[in-house]
Amino acid sequence: MMIFVLIFCILLLVTLITWAKVNAFLAFIIVALLAGCLFGMPFAKVIASINKGLGDTLGSVAIIIVLGAMLGKLVAESGAAQRIAHFMHDLFGAKYVTYAMALTGFIVGIPLYYNVGFILLVPIIFSVASSYRLPLLYVGMPMLTALSVMHGFLPPHPSPMTLISVFHADIIKTFGYGLVIAIPAIIIAGPIFAGTLKNIGSKGLRFANSQAPLPDNELPGIANSILSSLLPVILICLAYVLPVLFVAPPVIKTIAQWLGEPIIAMLLTVVISTYTLGLQKGRPLAKIMEGYVCAVKDIAMVLLIIGSAGALKQIFVDSRLSDALAVMLVQSAMPPLLLAWLATACLRLCLGSATVAGVTAAGVLFPIAQHAGINTNLLVLAIGAGSLFGSHVNDTAFWLCKEYFGLSVKETLRSWTVMESLVSVIGLAGVSALNCLL
């Protein structure tokens, strides 16, 4: 009976979001309340579970996501992303321009959320395509691939951070395994696949609302730009290296423990970058802070959706549904990581948003984390890969690609949707390979 209630709740959630166009936050809360009542939980306990789930989920990821949004805003407004793109353009030249675009998307995609990165980098794509007289889609798709992979696979992006919190995965190992999978996924679905898109017509975009490129003399230096984007990763990696290099001093171990905390790494990065990309370049502190406020407003609804998805997950846990699911999963012949990918891919096809699909899957698939021998780091990546599968007309990113590149729906399906599906399947293959090796 509980399984039928679960299926009904998932179908209702999909219907509310896709057909009725209900805001995802409201849809999650409505379904969580209904699910608790249908599972026979006392109403007071339903409310307590929702409060606990929302608070616990946001309590572990909200600070990191907010700091990541602030850093992304600063990287965008300061011109650091523009500097990185120009540097890659000059370094690789016309022959390897698609690899330059992919590498730019990879670096910029660490601090920037997908939609922000897309709007920011589209003018650069058009500039490069124009200067080399190359097809727009051929030049742009590798960069979009890298942005998408970083958004779906790697922290500090919202969905991976939420999954790491829910499954108690190790953020460093998840990031490391994610990089191993991300690189071949970006190369195959980016530059290599882009070679098949040269004949797809692209009439050009209208990007009047995107940020105008800054003059070269106002851009930060390339070292400053790259270090500011990669500093969170550098600090966390340093936390693991320091104890190895300096075994004895307890002070070093304490410093390493501090740097190893994602919140500390992100906060230090924001503070340092505020000076190097802002104050040092003559920008008033008040103006920088205004940008940070705008950044938080931009991701406020994302945070609410993540929190409400955590509330639904908690209902599933407190109603003992997780126990019933755990028994079914243990008895299932399907490998847990494949099951996680498949379930998330189905949610992605139904819900559209990769973030919503990922955080929804976290609640439904929570029992998998209890499966004997499951690697929770790979579980996060399997769900992340599934959340990118088959982007189509119910995904805002699909329409961004279509409208900005002047494509038809058929051409967008042939390019964008195929690219996203390639990334997802390659991600699953990478997760499976790592699972066999580890």
Image (spheres, rainbow, N blue to C red):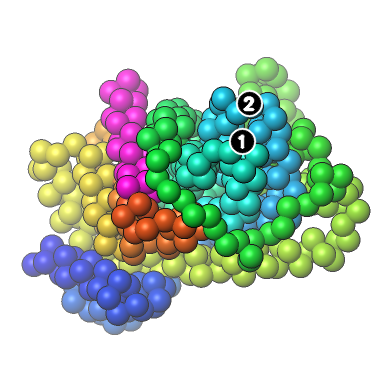
Q: In the image, what residue occupies the spot 73% across and 52% down?
A: 213
State the residue in front, 94 or 236: 94
Residue at 38% x, 65% y is: 309
Q: Quadrant of residue 307?
A: bottom left
Binning the other alpha carbons within 10 Å of mark 1 as few (below 14), some (14 to 19) or many (20 upward) gives few
Q: Dot 2 corresponds to which residue?
A: 92
Residue ID for mark 1? 132
Task: Please name whichever residue, 99 or 182, is drawn nearer the observer in this view of the structure.
Answer: 99
Across and down, in percent, residue 268 comes to: 73, 46
Q: Is 345 rendered above or below residue 173?
A: below
- Could you tell me if residue 209 is visible in this image? yes
Sequence-earlier tag: 2 or 1: 2
Q: Residue at x 89, y 48 (%)?
A: 280
Q: Which residues make up the magenta segment?
A: 414-438
Q: Is residue 298 left or right of residue 356?
A: right
Outermost residue toward the bottom? Answer: 43
Question: Foreground residue, 64 or 85?
Answer: 85
- Say which residue appears at 11% left-offset and 66% top-offset: 4
The answer to whether marks 2 and 1 mark residues whose Cβ atoms lie closer than 8 Å is no
Q: Is residue 427 magenta?
A: yes
- Front: mark 2 or 1: 1
Q: Quadrant of residue 101?
A: top right
Q: Which image quarter is the C terminus in?
A: top left
Question: Is 235 situated left or right of 49 in this image?
Answer: right
Question: In x, y percent, where is residue 399?
Answer: 42, 61
Q: Secondary structure at mark 1?
A: helix
Question: Element type at marker 2?
Answer: helix
Vertical order, 396 against 327 (above or below): below
Image-quadrant location for residue 360: bottom left
| Residue 232 in picture, x, y percent from top left | 65, 40
